[in-house]
Amino acid sequence: MELSVSTLCAFTSRMTLRTVLAIAFTTTCLLLPSGCVPSIGDTCTQSADCPTGATCDSTAPDGYCTIRDCDPGSCPAGSVCVEFEGEASFCMNHCEEESECRDSYTCRNDPGRPRFCYT
């Protein structure tokens, strides 16, 4: 079968809008791996918005997906375990520079801690 413009047009005209949107969404997810899977440090309004095992810290600006009481080396890829003085430890989004953090967050470089995105 020869694939011509007229064949392609006839095929796409039979596709429903739902099919076209499903293909577009799937393609976007494949091209943007972090765009469809929640990560530590993502915005959230509830824990269901976060990766499995993580919770939503709604006290942070726009929410912050994190895992409480982590151990060094136990956080998901792209995140680090940070111990806060007088508090528990949390998995935080790892960064090397400011551009890796979302708006209103900075790449903190506190002495004795790995770099992480937070306010």
Image (spheres, rainbow, N blue to C red):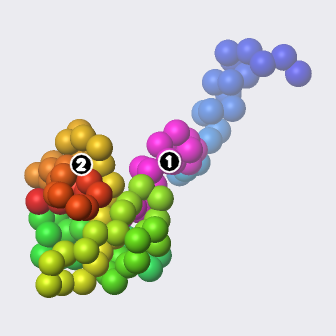
Please give the name of the residue rendered at 40% of the width and 71% of the height, measured from the top-left corner.
Answer: 72
Measured Cα–Cα span from mark 2 to mark 1: 17 Å
Residue located beneath label 1 in the image = 33
What segment carries the magenta color?
Answer: 23-41
Q: Is residue 86 above or below residue 22?
A: below
Q: Position of residue 85 (x, y in %)?
A: 15, 78
Q: Position of residue 109 (x, y in %)?
A: 18, 52
Identity, as a three-letter code, of the amino acid under mark 2: Cys
As rendered, which of 117 and 3 lies closer to the eye? Answer: 117
Direction right: furthest residue: 1
Quarter of the view holding residue 118: bottom left
Which mark identifies residue 45? none
Residue 46 in view in this figure: no
Does the magenta run of residues contain 69?
no
Quarter of the view holding residue 49: bottom left
As rendered, which of 27 and 7 lies closer to the eye? Answer: 27
Q: Is residue 67 above or below residue 116?
A: below
Provide the major secondary structure of the magenta segment: helix
Q: Is residue 11 left or right of residue 36?
A: right
Q: Is residue 7 left or right of residue 82?
A: right
Residue located beneath label 2 in the image = 101
Please give the name of the residue rendered at 50% of the width and 47% of the height, measured from the top-left corner.
Answer: 33
* Label 1 element class: helix
As rendered, which of 45 and 113 lies closer to the eye? Answer: 113
